[in-house]
Amino acid sequence: MRNSKILKHSLATVIVVLGISLLVACGSSAEPTPAPVEAEAVQQPRVVSAEAFVVPVKESDLAFETSGRVVAIEVDEGETVNEGDVLARIDDSTQQARVAEAQATLAQAKAGKTEAEARLAEAASKLAEAEASLAKVNAGPTDEEIAQLQATLAKAEAALANMIAGPTPEEIAEAAAQVQTRQAELNEVLADARDEDLQASASRVLKAEADVREAQDDYDQVRYGDPDDVLVAGVALEKFTLEYEAAKAEYDKLVNGATAEQIATAQARVSEAQASLTRVKAGATAEEIAQVQADVARAQADLDKLLAGSTDEDIAIAEAQVESAQANIATARANVGAAETDVEVNQTSVDLVQVELDKTVLKAPFSGEVSSLNNVDEGEIVQAGSKVVSLGDTSKWQIETDDLTEIDIVDVQIGANVTISVDALPGEEFKGKVVKITPKSETKAGDVTYTVLIDITKGPIARLRWGMTTFVDIEAGPEI
């Protein structure tokens, strides 16, 4: 490489010398040589030349982050993929099991948190109740509470007074009237049907029977005719049939008389009314009076206690209940905090095993073309970090050279103009600009070299292919 560049510079020197000789020969002619006109010197930029190659704007050798057996190669060489597309998979059964186990543990932790939050809500509710009770004990009874207990006492006292006074004439008369009503109902059940009632009922049966026959004739005449007429006749027949059945049932009831069950029911109602009359006349028993007296005493005690206000013991009990509720809510809050921590820890575990699961899928980090699969087959065991797929973003081509020595690179700057020739396209003109210079050198065949990246600004870019050989002339110099 260095020799070819030296040869270029030597040829340039020979050409310059030949040019000077020609000028001297011309000066020896008979014609006088005119005085030379001084021209302003034109400073041409120095050019640095190097071999370079066509490369995609982005390329990467992709590998799994974990070892495993390849179960699927999802792409072919030369295939275009989008960012996030799956390129290959390794066996994930172990990782799947760990994810399922971690998720189950997380679900239990979340359930524990929900339960702890429910207990905290319950503790908060009980604390509110205890504080309200303490406030009520300290505040004393309200006018509404006093009025309610006074009304209860008055009602109990009125009941006791009525019980001691005994039944009123109105109550006795009402009970006696009820006995007479029930006896009349029994007499009606036991009485035989009168002849005139039987005759009237029989007449209704005969009339209803005649109506049914007439309705049946009407129906028979139209049953195969107009559907509307059939409907009207059918409804009429059904109506008269029901009336006949009701009249027949009434007649049978009059003929047969009351059943044993109906008689027993009527007799029981008479006995019940008579017993009620007896109780009314007898008045309240000693036990009943004693029970109502106890109700009066209890209502009076409740009212007296309410009017007396809260005792020191009542206040102490209410305060103790508040303190107990506060302790319970503190414990419940601590339990919620512990449950939240448990959820966070288990969520972290799920995230970690999910990361391990994600490592079993190799995805495209950017859109591009698969350049090679590196001889990886399904069923093969690959090691973590071992190259599996090479991918390049061929949406834009660049030119890359790592052939510039430390002497060449000194005056090469970002933005320098570049002339590019492509071996495979000898008649095409390409232009470019330097967009990147590696800050650190590398040693190649004893030379210290730097890598330069060039954007193509002009030329038939669509005809380029990955790896094509090119030659670049980079304008160099402090003036750039």
Image (cartoon, helix red, strand yellow):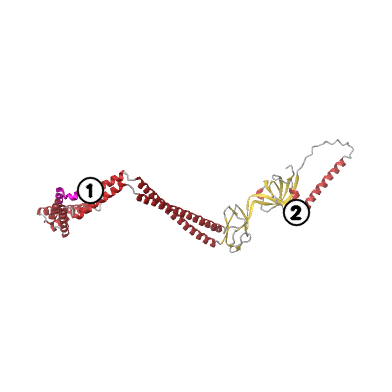
The picture places residue 416, in percent across and down from the top left corner, at: 71, 45
Verify whether residue 171 appears in magenta. yes
Q: Nearer the viewer, residue 158 or 385?
A: 158
- Residue 450 is at least partly visible in this image: yes
Magenta residue check for 422: no
Q: CA distance from mark 2 to mark 1?
A: 122 Å
Mark 2 or mark 1, earlier in chain? 1
404 or 87, which is in the foreground?
404
Which amino acid is tagged 2? Asp
In the image, taking residue 171 as reference, residue 44 lies left or right, namely: right
Check disc 2 and report its element: helix, strand or loop.
Answer: strand
Q: On the image, numbered disc 2 is attached to which residue?
A: 447
Label 1 crowd (10 A; few <14 / some 14-19 / many >=20): some
Q: Secondary structure at mark 1?
A: helix
Name which quarter of the figure residue 34 lies in.
top right
Residue 137 rendering spot, x and y as whole percentages = 35, 47
Q: Is residue 220 visible?
A: no
Disc 2 and disc 1 in contact, CB within 8 angstroms: no
Tell me if 331 is positioned left or right of 267 in this view. right
**The residue stretch that appears in magenta:** 160-175
Residue at image x 52%, y 62%? 97
154 versus 36 height, above or below: below
At which x and y percent is residue 357? 55, 58
Q: Give, as a three-letter code, the residue at label 1.
A: Glu
In the image, farthest residue toward the right? 30
Please state the horizontal and vertical placement of residue 141, each as a whole percent of the image. 32, 45
Q: Which residue is mark 1?
A: 157
Q: Main secondary structure of the magenta part?
A: helix
